[in-house]
Image (spheres, grey):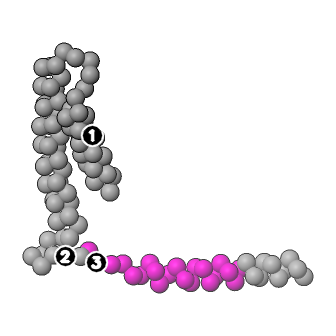
Amino acid sequence: MIRLARKTFLACCSVILAAQQIPQAEKEEKPKRMPDGTLQSEAILKDEQKKMLVDSLKLITLSKEIDDDLRKNDHHVLSVGMLKKLEEVEKLARKMRGRHAR
C-alpha cells in the first residue's frame, strides 16, 4: 500500500514538473533591435571590439616604454615609475581578459 502511494506521488510530481516546463519553452524572446534596425547584441560586440583595440594600443605603448626604460638602465632596481607602468599593464590585461570572458 505504501509503495503504491509513493509511486502515485512520484508520478504526480513528474506530471506537474513537466506541465510547468512547457509554458517556459513557448516564451522565446525575440532579439532586441536598436532604433536603426541592427541587433543590440551586435552593437554591443562592436563597441567591445573598439574598446579592446584602444586598450591593446595602450598596452603596446606601455610595454614599449617599459622596454626602453629597461634597456636604458643597467641597474637591478626598478624605478617607481616603471612599477606604476607595470601595474597599469596588469590592470589593462585583466580588463581585457574580463571583457573577453563575458
Residue 17, position as x, y percentages in the image? 60, 79
Where on the picture, by quarter, is residue 102? bottom left
Residue 2, position as x, y percentages in the image? 88, 80
For the question of whether residue 94 can be seen, the reply is yes
Q: Is residue 46 magenta?
A: no
Q: CA distance from mark 3 to mark 2?
A: 9 Å
Q: Which residue is more in the foreground, 5 or 76?
A: 76
Q: CA distance from mark 1 to mark 3?
A: 43 Å
- Which residue position holds label 1? 87
What secondary structure prevails in the magenta region?
helix
Say which label, 1 or 2, has the lower sequence index. Answer: 2
> Is residue 72 left or right of 94 when viewed as pictured?
left
Residue 82 to residue 96: above or below? above
Q: Secondary structure at mark 1?
A: helix
* Amino acid under disc 3: Lys
Q: Secondary structure at mark 2?
A: loop
- Which residue position holds label 3? 30
Where on the picture, by quarter, is residue 1? bottom right
Total marks in image? 3
Residue at the limit of the structure toward the right, as seen here: 1
Per the rendered image, the range of residues in magenta is 11-31
| Numbered mark located on residue 33 in the image | 2
Which residue is rendered at x = 15% and y = 25% of the image? 69
